[in-house]
């Protein structure tokens, strides 16, 4: 490569990196991007920019397709890359006036979203929860497991983010009379956890006479390690998302509508409710069926 070509390539990479950083900064300022969300976007865009053999402004549909093709054997990873790059180019087209390779000249999508397996992921059952509660070594641990099961809380809602961008549950966020807890959810959006009588009793005992401070005195990694330890002890796949899937599926089996589940679980889209309730089967629907003719 001639010196001038090397200089141009270096300049193109620098401008691409600047655009990526501007995109991330804008998302943080306008969308309340979490630390984990920032890591996902940064990884996605950086991987593509490092792979791209031409200047960013010259990228076309075939380059996106070729890049995504590297992840054919990792369908979830491929879909994640697709979503990240689609969002990045949508932003580039608005703020930098760059052509969007995801769309044709009439605004129609020309790159279909990658398909992902429809397998049922680990979903916590009532029996699983009872086993985990029996294995807990302290009242605090029981309260955490009970709250995860009753509310479908995200790990970051229980204990704050990995890098403490959210505070987790504070004593003055807990309303034991109304069975609600105010939390800072995904995208720094305020929401509410709901819970039942048994969880209320466990929380009341955990809080005791305190009027402020953290309810559980555990950070993100501390709660994650608790779940891992209980998983090893019981043989049950135990993480916050398995509780979240169990929460949504149990509500659906109880006849709660998807819009209500979406609100109670603090989801932003019905498609997410459908994804989290894949353990809901035809037999579940048949059990709730009522004949029209009597």
Image (cartoon, rainbow, N blue to C red):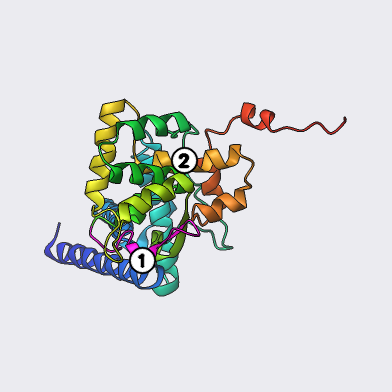
At x 36% / y 36%, what residue is drawn?
74
Q: Quadrant of the C terminus?
A: top right
Find disc 2 in the rendering and name its residue: 245
Question: Residue 70's spot in the image, x, y percent?
Answer: 33, 40
Provide the secondary structure element on which disc 1 rests: helix
Residue 209: image quadrant is bottom left
Q: Is residue 285 left or right of residue 231?
A: right
Question: Residue 84's spot in the image, x, y percent?
Answer: 38, 55
Q: Which mark is residue 172?
A: 1
Residue 208: image quadrant is bottom left
Q: Is residue 161 left or right of residue 278?
A: left
Magenta-drawn stretch contains 235: no
Q: Quadrant of the N terminus?
A: bottom left
- Of badges 2 and 1, nearer the viewer stands 1
Magenta span of residues: 163-181
User: In the displayed image of the protein, which residue is found farthest to the left?
Assistant: 3
Residue 133: image quadrant is top left
Q: Look at the magenta stretch and give its main secondary structure.
A: loop
Provide the secondary structure element on which disc 2 rests: helix
Res 235 seen here: yes
Question: Residue 218's spot in the image, x, y percent?
Answer: 23, 52
At x 63% / y 47%, what residue is drawn?
257
Q: Which mark is residue 180?
A: none
């Amino acid at each position: 490569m001639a010196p001038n070509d090397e200089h141009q390539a270096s300049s193109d990479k620098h401008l691409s990196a600047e655009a990526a950083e501007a995109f991330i900064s804008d998302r943080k300022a306008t969308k309340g991007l979490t630390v984990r969300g920032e890591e996902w976007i940064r990884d996605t865009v950086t991987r593509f920019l490092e792979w791209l053999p031409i200047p960013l402004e010259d990228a076309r549909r075939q380059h996106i397709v070729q890049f995504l093709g590297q992840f054919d054997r990792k369908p979830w990873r491929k879909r994640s890359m697709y979503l990240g790059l689609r969002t990045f180019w949508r932003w580039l087209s608005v703020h930098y006036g760059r052509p969007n390779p995801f769309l044709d000249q009439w605004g129609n999508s020309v790159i279909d979203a990658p398909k992902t397996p429809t397998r049922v992921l680990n979903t916590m059952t009532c029996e699983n929860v009872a086993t985990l509660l029996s294995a807990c070594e302290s009242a605090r641990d029981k309260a955490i497991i009970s709250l995860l099961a009753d509310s479908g809380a995200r790990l970051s809602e229980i204990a704050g983010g990995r890098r403490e961008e959210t505070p987790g549950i504070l004593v003055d966020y807990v309303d034991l009379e109304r069975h609600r807890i105010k939390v800072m959810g995904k995208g720094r959006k305020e929401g509410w956890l709901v819970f039942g009588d048994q969880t209320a009793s466990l929380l009341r005992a955990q809080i005791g006479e305190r009027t402020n401070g953290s309810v559980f005195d555990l950070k993100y990694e501390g709660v994650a390690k608790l779940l891992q330890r209980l998983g090893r002890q019981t043989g049950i796949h135990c993480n916050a998302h398995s509780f979240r899937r169990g929460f949504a599926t149990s509500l659906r089996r109880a006849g709660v509508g998807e819009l209500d589940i979406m609100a109670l679980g603090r989801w932003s889209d019905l498609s997410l409710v459908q994804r989290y309730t894949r353990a809901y089967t035809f037999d579940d629907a048949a059990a709730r069926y009522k004949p029209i003719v009597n």
